[in-house]
Image (spheres, helix red, strand yellow):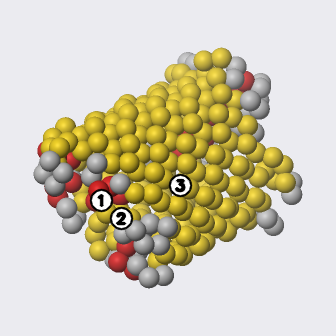
């Protein structure tokens, strides 16, 4: 997790509306708070994974399998005034594999995003708690805190910067418990507002683990393109992205007799098409190339899936 997508989309939509001379929020009542706004989504799908793996503990099976996926989310947004908004959300996801039930994964995410406007600058503070289980047992627990600032550089150019602090623990491998400090920046170029835009990003991360051999610094870059077209009186969405991460580990890994070095490429393409009412179908493809001098972290992986979603 590198950022809060909900907070970014809210800020972008508000700023784009303001540029067009349209108020991003309805008129506030003279006294008291307006009622909160609620949103929910459920999704169910099927996914093919060419290489069942657990990235957090550097394990890849070189075996493929199919998984049933289930997702659900609930969000509440509350306006306090013209410049301050709070978002609270809960996300649930479940991957249940056909053969490799030992890596069935269930994840719960509780989050909050506070956004407020200071002149021409939009600021935010997000806090998230993540609990992930494997085959019904404790696996990963993570806390994330991130202040951010964003604003338009020009009519079609938008920038966002953030600091991210993460504290994570892994039940089965306490030597991998770690704290992470990261700084990240994103630039958006809007060809046609939110209908068509590019996103360029950079992140520097410093992870300090319990075991010295797992300490590392990394630099990451990403490029995304999002395009929306009208279909069935709603918008269909197409997205393509590439991400690259270069990790340099500080200490020698005994099993290979040298410091570990990882270079990771990830490609992904998504298409979401509207159906009847508020339902939609999503089709996605992902390919990852993990290049490492540690054999267990040197592998390829392909993900292909589809899911049906309904939003309220």
Label number found at residue 287: 3
The answer to whether residue 256 is left or right of residue 128 is left
Place of residue 131 in the rendered image (x, y in percent of width and height, measured from the top left): 35, 62
Residue 296 — which label?
Answer: 1
Q: Where is residue 151 in the image (x, y as percent from the top left)?
A: 57, 23
| Secondary structure found at label 1 | helix
Which of marks 1 and 2 precedes in the sequence? Answer: 2
Answer above or below: position of 170 versus 196: below
Q: Name the residue under label 2.
A: 60
Residue at the spot x=68%, y=61% of the render?
Answer: 282
Residue at position x 50%, y 42% in the image: 243
Q: Is residue 64 left or right of residue 212?
A: right
Work out whether mark 3 precedes mark 2 in sequence or the reverse, and give the earlier one. 2
In this rendering, the answer to whether 69 lies above or below 1 is: below
Label 3 to label 2: alpha-carbon separation:
15 Å
At label 1, counting other C-alpha atoms closer than 10 Å, the crowd grade (few under 14, some 14-19, many 20 or more) is some
């Amino acid at each position: 997790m590198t950022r809060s997508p909900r907070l970014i989309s809210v800020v972008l939509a508000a700023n784009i509306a303001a540029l067009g001379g349209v108020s991003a929020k309805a008129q506030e009542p003279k006294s008291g708070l307006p009622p909160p706004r609620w949103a929910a989504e459920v999704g169910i799908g099927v996914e093919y994974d060419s290489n069942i793996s657990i990235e957090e503990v550097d394990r890849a099976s070189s075996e493929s399998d199919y998984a049933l996926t289930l997702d659900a989310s609930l969000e509440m947004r509350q306006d306090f005034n013209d410049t301050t908004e709070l978002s609270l959300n809960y996300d649930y996801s479940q991957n249940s594999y056909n053969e490799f039930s030992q890596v069935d994964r269930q994840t719960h995410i509780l989050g909050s995003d506070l956004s407020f406007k200071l002149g021409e600058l939009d600021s935010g503070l997000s806090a998230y708690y993540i609990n992930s289980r494997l085959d019904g047992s404790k696996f990963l627990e993570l806390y994330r805190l991130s202040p951010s600032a964003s604003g338009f550089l020009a009519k079609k150019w938008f920038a966002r910067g953030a600091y991210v602090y993460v504290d994570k623990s892994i039940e089965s491998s306490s030597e991998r418990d770690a704290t992470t400090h990261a700084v990240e920046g994103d630039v958006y170029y809007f060809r046609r507002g939110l209908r068509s835009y590019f996103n360029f990003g950079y992140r520097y991360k410093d992870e300090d683990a319990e075991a010295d051999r797992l300490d590392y610094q990394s630099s990451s870059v990403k490029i995304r393109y999002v395009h929306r077209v009208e279909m069935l009186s709603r918008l269909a969405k197409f997205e393509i992205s590439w991400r690259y991460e270069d990790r340099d580990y500080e200490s020698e890994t005994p099993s290979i007799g040298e410091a570990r070095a990882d270079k990771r490429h990830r490609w992904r393409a998504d298409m979401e098409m509207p159906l009847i009412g508020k339902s939609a179908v999503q089709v996605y493809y992902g390919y990852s190339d993990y290049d490492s001098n540690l054999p267990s972290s040197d592998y390829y992986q392909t993900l292909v899936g589809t899911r049906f979603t309904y939003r309220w």
